[in-house]
Image: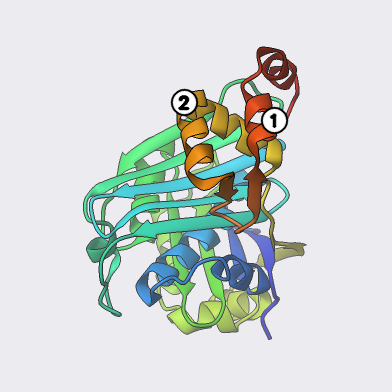
Amino acid sequence: MPEHDTLRRFIFEQLPVQGRHVHLDASWHAIQQHRDYPQPVRRLLGEALAAAALLSAMLKYEGTLSLQIRGGGPVHLLVVQCTSGLHLRGLAHWRGELAEDAGFRQLVGDGQLALTIEQIRQAERYQGIVALEGDSLAASLEGYFARSEQLPTRLWLHAGDGPAAGFLLQTVPGRDPAADAWQHVTVLADTLKPGELGSLSAQELLHRLYHEDDVRLFGAAPVAFRCHCSRERIEATLRGLGAEEVTGILKEQGKVHVDCEFCGRGYDFDAVDVQTLFVPDAQSAHSGARH
């Protein structure tokens, strides 16, 4: 039986290759509850969430990894985030009717893939942007690692009606494996059937693929849906819109209501709240607060 909402890391004892396996169940279902996604959009979002969890090892300290797709196709924006504590959230924007069997290219068209790393104790953030390529999200991410990180990396992603899951192989930084060793581990992984990613545990999957290799599997880390929206963050967004626009919304609707797109939580601001937002002393006080 598969683990539920877990990320597990493994290494090959005799090869400079490492990997990770992720299984998303309750966390994935919680994210879907906030929007009625068409099947192909849901599938792509699930794959992106699994990928973000797999790539969370790029966070060396406390922080957040964001994966963003901006495309020219029906899915014109997709954003997923995973924290160093393995808290996931994500959303996708789409337009028009979509065929149930629409593939990656039909969904996103031409566009860009961005990976952003923000770490709490670091003033600077890292961002890498590459053009979308290939016929899958996995292929685009592999292209990103080949160009931006020069680190051989392969991913297998799956999201259907049930869980979302992913499997990653990557060379150990600074230790390039022989070509035949890398071919050995990736060719075997290419025999994975999509359903096996969601139905097999990490231990079963590794035994299925590498029972003749010496592989060490580490303990499971829990993954969960968690949104870090807050009233303070929404207030900062409203200030960014400016007093004129926010006041206009207040006059038209009697209040300003904002829903977090990630979790669906609603925030209401009445006339007093809006006035306070744009009082200079209040803004100064908020600018000194840390969120």
Could you tell which of marks 2 and 1 lies nearer the N-terminus?
Answer: 1
The percent coordinates of residue 84 (x first, y second) are 69, 45
Direction from residue 97 to residue 211 in the image, left or right: right
In the image, what residue occupies the spot 26% across and 46% down?
111
Residue hosting label 1: 120
The percent coordinates of residue 204 (x first, y second) are 64, 81
Compared with residue 237, is residue 123 higher up or lower down, i.e. above or below?
above
Direction from residue 111 to residue 115 in the image, left or right: right
Compared with residue 129, is residue 208 higher up or lower down, i.e. above or below?
below
- Disc number for residue 244: 2
For label 2, the crowd category at 10 Å Cα-Cα, with few meaning under 14, some 14 to 19 and many 20 or more, is few
The answer to whether any part of residue 59 appears in the image is: no
Compared with residue 227, is residue 163 higher up or lower down, i.e. above or below?
below
| Nearer-the-camera pick, 199 or 206 | 199
The answer to whether any part of residue 166 appears in the image is: yes
The percent coordinates of residue 215 (x first, y second) are 65, 66
In the image, what residue occupies the spot 73% across and 49% down?
85
- Disc number for residue 101: none
Direction from residue 229 to residue 77 in the image, left or right: left
Amino acid type indicated by mark 2: Glu
Q: CA distance from mark 2 to mark 1?
A: 33 Å
Quarter that holds the N terminus: bottom right
